[in-house]
């Protein structure tokens, strides 16, 4: 049986930035939190993520004795600016579909533990951030994210990975508190443009830009379109403004070659006009929260982003997308974006489209033209 030092050595050898240990006791406080916020997190259960079942490690692995937490630094290399402008960094080198990066290292660590005689479960519905905090590996930000003690210069660019095992390890000293300095003036809460952050460690995920970008239902409400800004998929707003993240954002990092190699595939115009084959081959393996049947949402998000850039070069792209798409949500957002960008070409197109438009699309065109007037 491996001792603590051997387990730590293996984790670091495999490229993990840190490792910690905690008990397999239930996360009792989380039971209360989930009960109080049941309505806000009801969507998770519809996606097969039973958060309530994840509060007790013994329900994941009978005979559980410890939780081992691996800390992955997902922002160890710089990403192309063209990607950072529109996509959350945690998605830019995500291999949960391709399984050719982090997945291989997790598998190797799990195999190591199994070779030492342990039974191992990796439950994605258990709160990995709470496990990391209880292992004493860092603390929380007001934005609900986990900030490492040792990684990313104390920043939140980390992914805790919890493994439940049937072997006892000495637990770390819990650090469950918010560690934000008093002088930060609630930077993340103030900066959240959709009001998803209701207070320190109080998030309404249904208003979070990340949630809205890949789970939002129907046409994005008018009042959220401008606040969602230039984010196509995910959001780093609360992390970008956080003073605790400033040291790592200032670091001179080498360019991530995997992200750089696919940057051209995620150019806005290509996403707006992509077909099913393009989506399945180039987009879904990297950003998979939306399936092929949800390409309308991708295109709607891209159209909104184009409108929020206020860049005239996107007017022909939006006109083409309006003409080529039958989905009314995509066409409605193209109309809104044409009105937001404005100019003679956009106005002329909107007037032409209005002649045959119906329903919500006609309403969006009318509002866009009123705004231009």
Image (cartoon, helix red, strand yellow):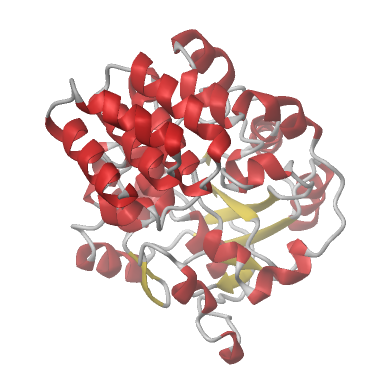
21 sits to left or right of 26: right
Q: Nearer the viewer, residue 265 or 72?
A: 265
Q: Position of residue 303 (x, y in %)?
A: 43, 35
Q: Nearer the viewer, residue 184 or 85?
A: 85
Q: Nearer the viewer, residue 261 or 40?
A: 261
Which picture quadrant has residue 224? bottom left
- At a point 36% along the width and 30% down the height, the residue shown is 348
Position of 23 relative to 291 (above/below) = below
> Count the marks: how many?
0
Position of 65 relative to 355 (above/below) = below
Task: Give the farthest residue toward the top.
Answer: 277
Q: Position of residue 60 (x, y in %)?
A: 39, 44
- At a point 79% along the width and 38% down the height, the residue shown is 256
- At a point 49% along the width and 25% down the height, the residue shown is 317
Can residue 219 be seen? Answer: yes
296 sits to left or right of 97: left
Task: Give the farthest residue toward the left.
Answer: 359
Can residue 151 be seen? Answer: no
Q: Position of residue 212 (x, y in %)?
A: 35, 46
Q: Nearer the viewer, residue 293 or 49?
A: 293
Which picture quadrant has residue 196? bottom left
Q: Position of residue 363 (x, y in %)?
A: 17, 39
Task: Give the farthest residue toward the bottom.
Answer: 182
Position of 366 relative to 190 (above/below) = above
Q: In which quadrant will I find the N terminus?
A: top right
């Amino acid at each position: 049986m491996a001792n603590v030092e051997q387990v730590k050595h293996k984790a670091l050898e495999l490229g993990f930035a840190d490792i910690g240990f905690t008990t397999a006791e239930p996360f009792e406080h989380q039971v209360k939190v989930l009960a109080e916020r049941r309505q806000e997190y009801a969507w998770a259960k519809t996606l097969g993520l039973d958060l309530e079942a994840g509060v007790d490690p013994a329900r994941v692995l009978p005979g559980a004795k410890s939780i081992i937490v691996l800390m992955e630094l997902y922002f160890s290399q710089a990403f192309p600016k063209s990607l950072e402008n529109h996509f959350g960094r945690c998605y830019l080198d995500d291999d949960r579909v391709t399984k050719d990066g982090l997945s291989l290292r997790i598998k190797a660590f799990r195999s190591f533990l199994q070779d030492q005689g342990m039974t191992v479960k990796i439950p994605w519905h258990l709160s990995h951030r709470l496990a990391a905090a209880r292992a004493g590996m860092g603390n929380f930000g007001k934005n609900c994210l986990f900030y490492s003690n040792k990684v990313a210069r104390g920043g939140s660019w980390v992914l805790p990975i919890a493994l439940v095992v049937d072997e006892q390890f000495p637990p770390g000293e819990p650090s469950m508190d918010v560690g934000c300095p008093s002088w930060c003036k609630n930077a993340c809460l103030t900066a959240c443009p959709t009001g998803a952050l209701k207070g320190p460690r109080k998030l309404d995920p249904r208003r979070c830009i990340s949630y809205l970008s890949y789970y939002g239902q129907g046409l994005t409400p008018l009042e959220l379109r401008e606040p969602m800004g230039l984010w196509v998929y995910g959001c780093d707003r609360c992390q970008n403004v956080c003073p605790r993240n400033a040291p790592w954002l200032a670091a001179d990092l080498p360019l991530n070659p995997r992200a750089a190699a696919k940057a051209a595939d995620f150019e806005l115009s290509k996403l707006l006009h992509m077909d099913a084959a393009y989506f399945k081959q180039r987009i879904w393996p990297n950003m998979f929260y939306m399936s092929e049947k949800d390409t309308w949402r991708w295109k709607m998000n891209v159209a909104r982003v184009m409108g929020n850039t206020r860049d005239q070069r996107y007017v022909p792209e939006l006109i083409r997308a309006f003409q080529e798409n039958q989905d009314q949500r995509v066409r409605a957002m193209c109309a809104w974006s044409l009105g937001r960008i404005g100019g003679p070409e956009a106005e002329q197109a909107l007037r032409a489209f209005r002649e045959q438009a119906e329903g919500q699309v006609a309403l969006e065109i009318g509002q866009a033209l009123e705004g231009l007037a």
